[in-house]
Image (spheres, grey):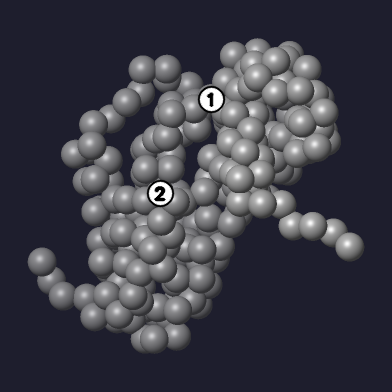
Amino acid sequence: MTTEPSPYHRRVAEQKRAAIVEAATRLFLDAGYAGTSLARVAEAAGVSKATLFKQFPTKAALFDAIVTESWTVEDDSDLRPPPGDLRAGLTAIGRRYVTLLTRPGMAALFRIVIAELPRFPELGEAHFARGKMPYFESVRRYLDTANARGTARLDDTELAATQFLGMISNYVFWPRMLLMNWSPDDASMAHVVDEAVLMMDRRYGTATTDD
């Protein structure tokens, strides 16, 4: 017979997990994936090695958790807006995408994956499968719903989601990978989202009106 942990013990475990993820993120960003050991993470998080191994038995599992949390949307209502208004729905999704891409450390996390890819190809697979794809799928599902409701007419929602997110990330995010000082202001990023929404509406919307 097993005994469920008490609320206190669950809370302590969650606090330790958060400390481990925070410390590991900082070390990965500072020293890279190869240069960070689980022993250093345990020391920086202020937990025992046994505690760390209980939650994250491998460094890969720990990195997976960091990637997942980096792409996690605290309030996912913006990813499930009502499909009755295509412009409003895509605007909410586009703004949330900007928020994700401009999170502190997001560009650095991508750089780690790219730099370590030849030695640790599983990092790229984890980042793609646990980070980018779940978010992409949420956008595709929204377009599927809009298509089914008749507010959009799409033959390929996967392509449409790629087009929409690409229009935003090509300005907001990818220049950061090469230009360390690339930091467009909020108004510029909002304008990019608005223009991407307008293009999507003109291409796929069924209730387009001239502005």
Give coordinates of residue 184: x percent, y percent.
28, 30
Is there any visible trace of residue 123 in the rendered image?
A: no
Q: Residue at x 23, y 37 (%)?
A: 186
Question: To which residue does mark 2 refer?
Answer: 97
Q: State whether residue 116 is above or below residue 197.
A: above
Is there any visible trace of residue 198 in the rendered image?
A: yes
Residue 108 is tagged as 1
- In the displayed orientation, state which residue is furthest to the left: 211
**Toward which corner of the image does residue 17 lie, by quadrant?**
top right
Dot 1 surroundings within 10 Å: few (below 14), some, or many (20 or more)? some
For this rendering, which residue is in front, 68 or 208? 68
Give coordinates of residue 36: x percent, y percent.
73, 17
Give coordinates of residue 135: x percent, y percent.
53, 55
For this rendering, which residue is in front, 163 or 129? 129
Q: Which residue is drawn at 42% across and 20% down?
A: 179
Count of numbered circles on the image: 2
From the viewer's perspective, tell me whether residue 49 is left or right of residue 68. right
Tell me the quarter of the image containing the C terminus: bottom left
- In the displayed orientation, state which residue is furthest to the right: 1
For mark 1, give the secondary structure. Answer: helix
Q: State whether residue 107 is above or below residue 211.
A: above
Q: Which residue is drawn at 45% across and 79% down?
A: 145
Q: Say if mark 1 contacts mark 2, CB within 8 Å.
A: no
From the viewer's perspective, tell me whether residue 191 is left or right of residue 173. left
For mark 2, give the secondary structure. Answer: helix
